Amino acid sequence: MRRTVSHYAGFLVLTMLALGILSASPVIWAEPLPGQEGLPPELVIQAVPALDDQIDVLEDLADYAEENAPETGFLASLKSMFSGGQGPRLVNISDLAAHIEDLKGNIVAVEAVYEAQDEGQGLFRSIGVSCHLTWAGGTQPQGFPDAGPDGLPARVEGTVEVNEQGEPVIRVQKLTPAMALTFIRLARAYELDEEYKDAVEAYQAGAQASGTSGYQYGAFAQVHGAEVALSQLKDKAKARVMYDRAWTAYAAGGKDDFYTWTHPANGDKWQKQLIRKTIAEPLDSLKRGGFWYGLVSAFVSIAGGHKALGIILLAIVTRLMIYPLTKKQLSSMQAMQAIQPQIKQLQKKYKDDKQKFQEEFWNLSKEHNVNPLGGCLPLIVQMPILIMIYRGIRDYVVQFDGASFLWVPNLSQPDMPLLIAYAISMFLFQKMTEKMNPAAAADPQQAQQQKMMAYLMPAMFFFLFRGMSAAFILYWLSANLVYFGEHLWYRRTHTPGEESEKSKKSSSGFVAAMAKMVSGATGKAEKEDKAAPLPPSYEKTRAASEGRKIGKEKDEKRK
């Protein structure tokens, strides 16, 4: 964005002239620029002073607002928790008027364009509502030019009162530039000045500031910024990101109370429209060319256009394609179960020597050709595939809007019964994979932690996926059910130790390398181990090893 002050002096001169000419009117910037009919008062840019002068002042206000903005994030939340909070919660003017009796006597924050009235009096206007402002004793504006806040985006903090007409009045205790509205008005000024790149950046900043404060025009900033990026900059990537964020924040989950304003190409006045209807077509068009979008679309086509069946079919085929990895995972789990009695014996024998236990554990795994990491590595390899599938479903979300399945009325919106079913499947999935973790098999403490995870993971995913579309939840539920089927089929068709016998070979390989690393084998011992075949029995090997130690001790005593 521009950060110049070359026009600031001119702005002050024009302001003083305007004050002299318009002394009969309390509002300095009264005449709007053409082509803004239908927009809310907060989004209308006036013709006086000159657009460049307005931009300079708004840039200064934006700098001040950013420098003095409260901290955000987890640490800031903790700090506010112990320090009494970060200040009053922002209330939109429409909400203030609708809930005046409930808010009466509370300290709130409100943002709008400030209109000066009589001395110590001001006014905020929005669509069909207004809020009177009365300055408390000693209140002084902060961060505004010398001419004052008149005609500029302002944030007031104060106590809610009611006048004789039943209208809301705020006794102002603090008056500063409003960050979200300042960026949005700056973006509007850039756009009217045909500085479209700066306009898009300012719209993004306004949307981000609105997201942290709950300001009502954040949806407009996100959506209209995307429209400018697409129509004026031809930047499809940026437009896609902004449309996607707008859908997630203001349309996903069945949200029908967020609106934006669009300007038809024929030059008529701006029209208020629901976010969902405004961005559905351009968002879907921008995502349609992606590979993962096309993959989901292909499975929907194979399912005869039935979107839910297409998702289920995609889950089945995906699980079948990665079955070789799943088979290795299940084989490792079964092999670990087969040597559980010997692991428990080692735990009892070396309960006071964990280092020795770890060494013997890895030797036992090598002897039985069991890969302790075999249950984890295939799962890690599968995750990128599953994440890409999720991306495809997310890209296809507009097409899911309005599609139903069984009791689910809309696949693009969350569905609680389906989410509960998924959480149950996740719990069963965790219980079935408890024994895949070699650390759990080797350490009772970690085994207990693994059991706790069987309860914590489903609960965590339940809250994490509360806002996810039913289509996404349906995919994961279907994938889990297919996995259960694979698990049962594998256990019926494979006996314990079968895969281990098939894969027996020399001591070279990943498991042997891990065993050597854990046990500290280096130098000459490594070379000898590579040349020597595996001992016929782990028990015999351990007994022989202990026998050699005893023999050495006897020789030393004889000496």
Image (tube, rainbow, N blue to C red):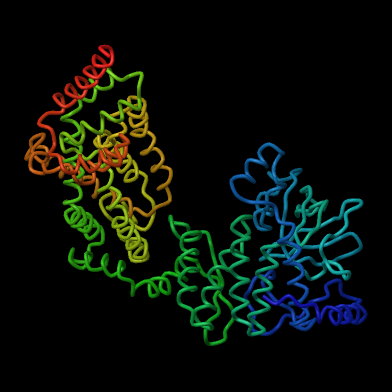
At 73% from the left and 75% from the top, the residue drawn is: 3
In the displayed structure, 235 sits above or below 91; it is below
Going 70% across and 67% down the picture, which residue do you hit? 182
Report x, y in % for residue 481. 21, 45
Image coordinates for residue 247, horizontal then vertical, percent: 46, 63
Considering the image in quadrants, where does the N terminus appear? Answer: bottom right
| 456 sits left or right of 235 in the view | left
Of residues 266 and 469, the one nearer the viewer is 469
Query: Which image quarter is the C terminus in?
Result: top left
Q: Nearer the viewer, residue 391 or 442?
A: 442
Q: Position of residue 139 (x, y in %)?
A: 88, 54
Kindly indicate the quadrant of the structure image that contains residue 271: bottom right
Q: Which residue is drawn at 76% across and 55% down?
A: 167
> Eyeballing the image, is 233 above or below 521?
below
- Most distant residue in the bottom direction: 266
Quadrant of res 334: top left
**How many numbered markers are drawn?**
0
* Res 359 quadrant in image: top left
Residue most toward the front?
Answer: 559
Q: In front here: 497 or 327?
A: 497
